[in-house]
Image: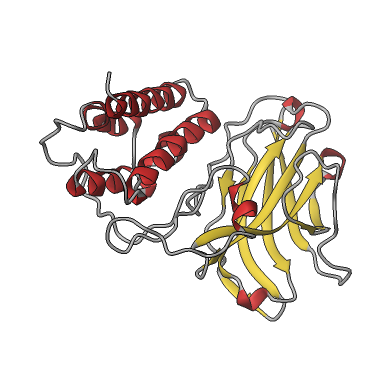
Amino acid sequence: MSDVNKTIQKWHASFKKGTDFDSWGQLVEAIDEYQILARQLQKEVQSTNSSDFTEDQKVTFLLSTHPHFITCTQSQGEFKLEDLKKLEPFIKNVLTYNKDFPFDVQPGPLRRILAPGEEENLEVEVEEEAAGVGSLESFPNRVPGTLLPRLPSEPGMSLLTIRIDKIGLKDAGQCIDPYITVSVKDLSGIDLNPVQDTPVATRKEDTYIHFSVDVEIQRHIERLPKGVAIFFELKHYKPKKRFTSTKCFAFMEMDEVKPGPIVIELYKKPTDFKRKKLQLLTKKPLYLHLHQTLHRD
């Protein structure tokens, strides 16, 4: 088997793994697999030395990494798993596929998808010109605006809604397209719930970025194991480096879950999901402002 056929086989296996996770309701694992595949396709697009694929095929790779297809289908109301599976013949038979792309999307100016932890490494790298098709820009590791609806209520169980009001930063006005990634992690830093991203902030005012958005935690509070924390990562776009970076993070432990307003401290990146080496972002009174609501049936 040739190297290019091995590459295509690997792509197809990753795609199939993602759709399997998707169909089983394992949203976090599905998104991870979709993004692994998207990074592989984008790497091929950006390779100036590759002659294995035509320019038309590379443009189609870009279509396959459209935001619709790198987020889990169960978190996107308009895009279903059966639709996503229409991509399988293209990915499996890319060298001979001669039909139109199954969806009406354009490659457009997108941003690079980063692997976990890659954005911190990019901070210290020398800026280079991105190579690829047309005016390809960098991709964000996630697409802002992937909030999920509240789970169905169950007798004797509590659900938590966290309203993200605002975050205080001395350079709030300089953040481009800021949004917050919300995740629920155990002590080992493993995701227990689907990761969610807020939409881009509604406004910036003085030293505050305002979000005014509700996030529904995707598990009943009573079913969360000991040691769990809810993380909030502020992310913003860096046009010169062409990627989305983590600005700072905050977290809330389970003993802090109670109805009403709360302000929590901000910490320096990289995000320490294990909570072992924490450094405050600033000594100034700047915090993440939240409001919690508990729903009990």
Query: Quick check: 264 above or below 171?
Result: above
Q: Extreme top residue here?
A: 1
The image quarter in which residue 54 lies: top left
Whole-percent x, y for residue 13 in the image: 38, 22
Q: Looking at the image, which residue is at 25% across and 46% down?
A: 58
Q: Residue furthest bottom?
A: 206
The residue lying furthest to the front in this view is 49
Residue 181 picture location, percent across and down: 61, 50
| The one of 10 and 189 positioned closer to us in this rendering | 10
On the image, which quarter does residue 51 sit in?
Answer: top left
Q: Is residue 52 above or below residue 168?
A: above
Q: Is residue 128 visible?
A: yes
Q: Is residue 76 visible?
A: no
Position of 199 with respect to 268 (left or right) is: left
Q: Nearer the viewer, residue 97 or 104?
A: 97
Please tell me which residue is depicted at 46% across the width and 36% down the height of the picture.
36
Give coordinates of residue 232: x percent, y percent. Answer: 69, 51
